[in-house]
Image (cartoon, rainbow, N blue to C red):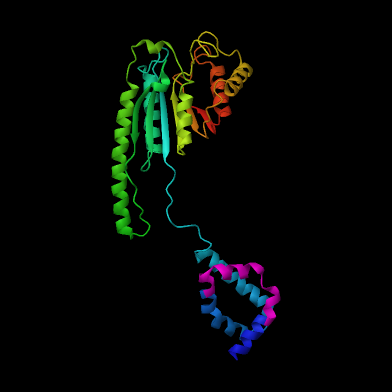
Amino acid sequence: MAVALKKNLLTNCKPIFPSFWSNILAVCPFCVGYLKSISPILLLIFANNMNFPSLFRACSLLFLGFALTHCSFFEKDKKTIADAPTHTLVFIDKTQSVNVNRAFVNDKYKQVLNDLVEQNIRQKGDKLEVYFIHENTQKGRAMSLTCRTEVENTEAMNATDREAAQTSSDMLLQRERMIFLRQAMAKLGVQNVGSSQQYTDIWASLPVIASAAEAGAEVKVYYLSDMIESMRGPQRRDFHTKAPQDNAQAETWAKADAKGSLKNYALGGADIKIVLPFEPTSSTKENNPTVTTYWTTLLQELGAVGVEEL
């Protein structure tokens, strides 16, 4: 009787058998095995209800729901795939126009350093580099640290071992973060008493960012600066002597520079934060918004995906 029912089942249901079922059964051993295991149950159900097409649709939907929920063919890969390492670049202004010893500036910059270490140092390979902005910014690297704590894959562990491994990793990672933060804070307090404090070469930070982006890491950049570019020479900008008059001019200058002197520096989707040392009550003379417009436009023209003023 079972053989007859099975033959009748296939004959009546073949016209409504969706094509994608054939594909699923062809590539998914789990689905084949499960269908075989429930076939006796299906035969008993069909024996008492000969309305094959409608009943087959109902059973098909139930089976498909189960397969989508449990079948490893449809599930996302359960292996933990490590994120790409994060390369964090911090450019700290060490020119005479920025005084990090002012209480407001010092507190603001310390909070930013604390936040970026907490957010960006998460796994082995994450890197934090600090550069000083002055006349020779490109050669102003003051610190470079790479995280060595490897977060263990706890997927196959039981609950107790998973919690112990996670606690151990968290402790080691937090210890490294404290080292990173302590050294970054020390660099914040460094005073520049040399002649390099008289000029501000922020353009020179662009090849540093471009080089980090080429390495394939997720690049996050923080400018702790007033962003007043001040360099002498042909095709350079000196915002102390000649700042953009309005946003339109700022955008025009930025686009011209991006297509001219700086065209070879592709920032590769870097995420950039500009942390200005100005209080909310500062005047436009002190905190010129057209300067921010210039940098926002320039960085986006060179490929930065996000430029935010903090």
Please state which of residues 155 and 215 is positioned toward the viewer in this rendering: 215
Q: Position of residue 123 (x, y in %)?
A: 37, 43
Q: Is residue 101 above or below residue 32?
A: above
Quadrant assignment for the N terminus: bottom right
Q: Position of residue 272 (x, y in %)?
A: 49, 30
Q: Which residues are magenta?
A: 11-32
Q: Check residue 21 for magenta coloring.
A: yes
Q: Residue furthest bottom?
A: 1
Q: Is residue 158 above or below residue 184?
A: below
Please state which of residues 177 and 91 is positioned toward the viewer in this rendering: 91
**Taken as a whole, is the magenta stretch helix, strand or loop?**
helix
Which residue: 53% across, 32% down? 306
Q: Position of residue 153 (x, y in %)?
A: 36, 53
Which residue: 50% across, 16% down? 287
Q: Quadrant of residue 17?
A: bottom right
Q: Residue furthest top?
A: 241
Please state which of residues 162 and 239 is positioned toward the viewer in this rendering: 239
Residue 48 seen by the camera: no
- Whether residue 77 sits left or right of residue 20 in the image: it is left
